[in-house]
Image: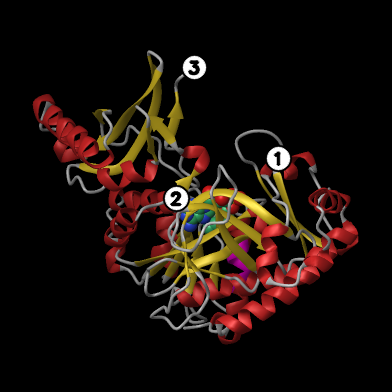
């Protein structure tokens, strides 16, 4: 199912023409209205009139997270507040939150982008959609809500948390589809099992998961535990929220809604734009938003772009599943490691649950990594000797695949805190 045939299957040439027109319009929009962008463009010696070609995007300055924090709350809002109809925000871990103001037209476009996500996952008007993303300032809850509403799904606005109730609602209301973070999907699946409810026997058939990195191995695990097709949503508050990109039935990368958001990948150190097929930091330019357009935003998310024929018929450029965030990259014995690499290995080990945490500690002058992972209940009961054997197996697997030595500890079932939203899986104990 394709929601917006025109833009999702547009030819590359037509898309390029469309993007150029919108890029010109948006650059002039921010230049004329926001002193922040005027100063940044002037410093680079670029004027909106200098944009003649799509490659001129590379001449524009980057915007970074601290620019948003420095302009908190509405310094980057390009319309009067009377035209702003809603504000979302992401808390982040440090400093001021990132705010996202929207005009009525921005909200409409956002709903269109998210509706594409629903259709690509095979969720339509006849579906009952349980929305277990957190409702509120977080863009997940209302972002999914307004799209499901536009499509005409029957919405169950459960929000996140109260997991037992989530299971009961799925059961009683006959939800056919669900949205939440992948880690919360695992929590729901586990709670269902504890309650003696077999989700695989219920009408639930699709999930749309996102807001945090997850591996293909995690996707298969969730599909198996819930008896569903697990699809993906990607996005960030700075660029509207979910709806930036989504996967389709091919499950081979995520289509970027590039008529709204242009994507580039750069080398995070040299800031040089990289060719498609090369991994680097994702950069987004929002070319249609009016309250808070964004010029070349550095996401810190690591991926690769590809423009290729997709089995689903969409022509929208694809990005690979997010490999990790540059902030989450660990350097262990001189080797760069992303948590996703460890997750992929752990999920291949049949004796453990998909519940783990990574702890970074100081070992002399170097950083050392410890992995705590839960043993399956029946495995945990086999005793210490067996656990040691499995721990060693995991240590060897990680050394063989990632090339680093780590300490692995199998911990008791249910001893790792369960997630209801974005899971916190990396702990820094270097200063403890
Ligand atoms: O997490 C928006 C969202 C809500 C996306 C619901 C999908 C579903 P923020 O809270 O601003 O916005 O966090 C944005 O989360 O830069 C990524 O690092 C990460 N992220 C979001 N989706 C994915 C995904 C929402 N599918 C940050 N895979 C982004 C990996 C993701 N990381």
Say few, some or many: other residues with alpha carbon within 10 Å of mark 1 (under 14 / 14 to 19 / 20 or more). Answer: few
Question: Which residue is rendered at x = 82% and y = 48% of the image?
Answer: 43
Disc 2 residue crowd, few under 14, some 14–19, many 20+, Cα 10 Å: many
What secondary structure characterizes most of the magenta part?
A: helix
Instruction: Identify which residue, 76 or 115, lies in the foreground.
Output: 76
Q: Nearer the viewer, residue 264 or 261?
A: 264
Q: Earlier in the sequence, mark 2 or mark 3?
A: 2
Judging depth in this view, the residue of 289 and 299 nearest the camera is 299
Pointer 2 or 1: first along the chain: 1
Residues marked 2 and 3 touching at CB (< 8 Å): no
The residue segment tinted magenta is 143-148
Q: Which residue is mark 3?
A: 431
Per the image, is 352 magenta? no
Q: Quadrant of residue 426?
A: top left
Residue 146, horizontal then vertical, whole percent: 63, 69
Q: What residue did someone put label 2 on? A: 213
The tag earlier along the polypeptide, 1 or 3, is 1
Residue 147 drawn in magenta: yes
**Would you name the residue on which mark 1 appears?**
66
């Amino acid at each position: 199912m394709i929601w917006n045939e025109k833009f999702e299957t547009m030819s590359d040439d037509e898309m390029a023409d469309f993007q150029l027109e919108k890029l010109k319009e948006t650059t002039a929009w921010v230049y004329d209205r926001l002193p922040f962008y005027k100063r940044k463009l002037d410093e680079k010696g670029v004027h909106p009139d200098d944009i003649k070609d799509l490659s001129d995007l590379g001449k524009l300055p980057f915007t970074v997270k601290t620019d948003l924090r420095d302009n908190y709350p509405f310094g980057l809002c390009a319309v009067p507040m009377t035209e702003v109809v809603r504000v979302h925000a992401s808390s982040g871990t440090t400093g001021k939150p990132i705010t996202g103001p929207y005009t009525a037209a921005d909200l409409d476009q956002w709903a269109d982008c998210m509706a594409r996500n629903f259709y690509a996952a095979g969720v339509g008007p006849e579906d009952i959609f349980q929305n277990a993303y957190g409702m509120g300032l977080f863009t997940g809850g209302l972002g999914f809500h307004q799209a499901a509403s536009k499509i005409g799904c029957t919405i169950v606005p459960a929000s996140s948390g109260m997991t037992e109730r989530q299971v009961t609602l799925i059961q009683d209301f006959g939800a056919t589809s669900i949205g939440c973070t992948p880690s919360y999907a695992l929590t729901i699946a586990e709670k269902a099992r504890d309650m003696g409810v077999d989700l695989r026997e219920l009408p639930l058939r699709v999930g749309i998961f996102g807001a945090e990195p997850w591996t293909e191995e995690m996707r298969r695990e969730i599909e198996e535990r819930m008896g569903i097709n697990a699809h993906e949503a990607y996005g960030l508050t700075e660029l509207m929220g979910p709806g930036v990109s989504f996967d389709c039935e091919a499950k081979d990368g995520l289509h970027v809604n590039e008529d709204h958001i242009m994507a580039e990948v750069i080398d995070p150190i040299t800031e040089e734009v990289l060719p498609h097929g090369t991994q680097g930091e994702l950069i987004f330019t929002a070319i249609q938003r009016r309250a808070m357009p964004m010029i070349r935003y550095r996401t810190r998310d690591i991926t690769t772009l590809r423009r290729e024929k997709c089995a689903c018929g969409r022509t929208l450029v694809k990005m690979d599943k997010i490999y990790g965030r540059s902030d989450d990259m660990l350097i262990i014995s001189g080797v760069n490691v992303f948590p996703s690499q460890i997750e992929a290995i752990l999920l291949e080990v049949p004796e453990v649950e998909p519940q783990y945490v990574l702890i970074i500690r100081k070992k002399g002058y170097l950083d050392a990594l410890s992995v705590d992972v839960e043993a399956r209940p029946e495995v945990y009961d086999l005793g210490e000797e067996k656990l040691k054997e499995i721990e060693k197996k995991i240590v060897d697997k990680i050394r063989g695949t990632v090339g680093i030595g780590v300490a692995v500890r199998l911990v008791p079932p249910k001893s790792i805190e369960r997630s209801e939203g974005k899971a916190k899986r990396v702990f820094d104990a270097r200063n403890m």
